[in-house]
Amino acid sequence: MLVGVMLHKAQYLQLVAGLSPLIAVGSMAVLSSALVGRFGCAVVFGAGAAVAAAGMLVFSRVPADGGLPLAIIASAFIGAGIAPMMTLATDVVVGSAPPERPGAASALSETASEFGAAWGIAALGSIGAALYRAQAQGGVPDDIPAEVADVIGSSLGAALGIAEQLPDDDAAHPTALVRQSFIGGRTAR
């Protein structure tokens, strides 16, 4: 799920808020694993999960217009909660393996991480795309050709690509529609 959330954050920061990929990645980079030595595994896992959940809840409320500061704050909370847990989880898995099997433990940990990442992207991506499509296609004016409406409903990137080819006056409505549809497709109700 985490990677699914990260996918949506990256799309928001780049396609809705208009940040460059480099700036978007930099705004999401938060790491703090020094807490483990001071507080122990259980506290770090519990606190990390709570902090990450709070960040995800806040991120689910980021608006299309003017939401960049809130998205950065939410991303910082998500990263601050997840980073120590991910580091600690790998350490616990590899550290609990017999001394002759650390490679197998590391491989298992990495496989589980990759599987979770793929599942998160598939689940959140599918749900988000379906909600986006329903909202975007429902908001397309009747005078828009069906082919253009299909492209608008296909993805945020494709819709913004079409809008960039229109004159500024004609592009304002579809751009606002698809950005709001993307936000509406991933916000908590």
Image (cartoon, grey):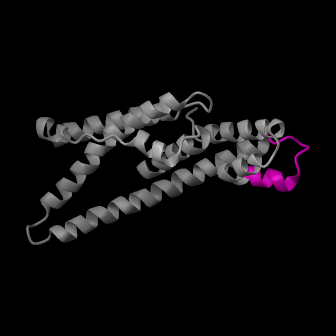
| Quarter of the figure that contains the C terminus | top right
- The residue sitting at 26% across, 68% down in the picture is 107
Q: Is residue 146 magenta?
A: yes
Q: Nearer the viewer, residue 122 or 180?
A: 180
Q: Is residue 151 magenta?
A: yes
Q: How many marks?
A: 0
Among the 4 quarters of the image, the one containing residue 115: bottom left
Residue 18 shown left or right of residue 143 in the figure: left
Residues in magenta, as a range: 139-153
Among the 4 quarters of the image, the one containing residue 147: bottom right
Q: Position of residue 109 (x, y in %)?
A: 27, 62
57 up-or-down from 20: above or below: above
- The residue sitting at 14% across, 35% down in the picture is 39
Residue 58 appears in view: yes
- Residue at the extreme right of the image, as rendered: 143
Residue 53 appears in view: no
Q: Nearer the viewer, residue 23 or 142?
A: 23
66 up-or-down from 109: above or below: above
Among the 4 quarters of the image, the one containing residue 186: top right
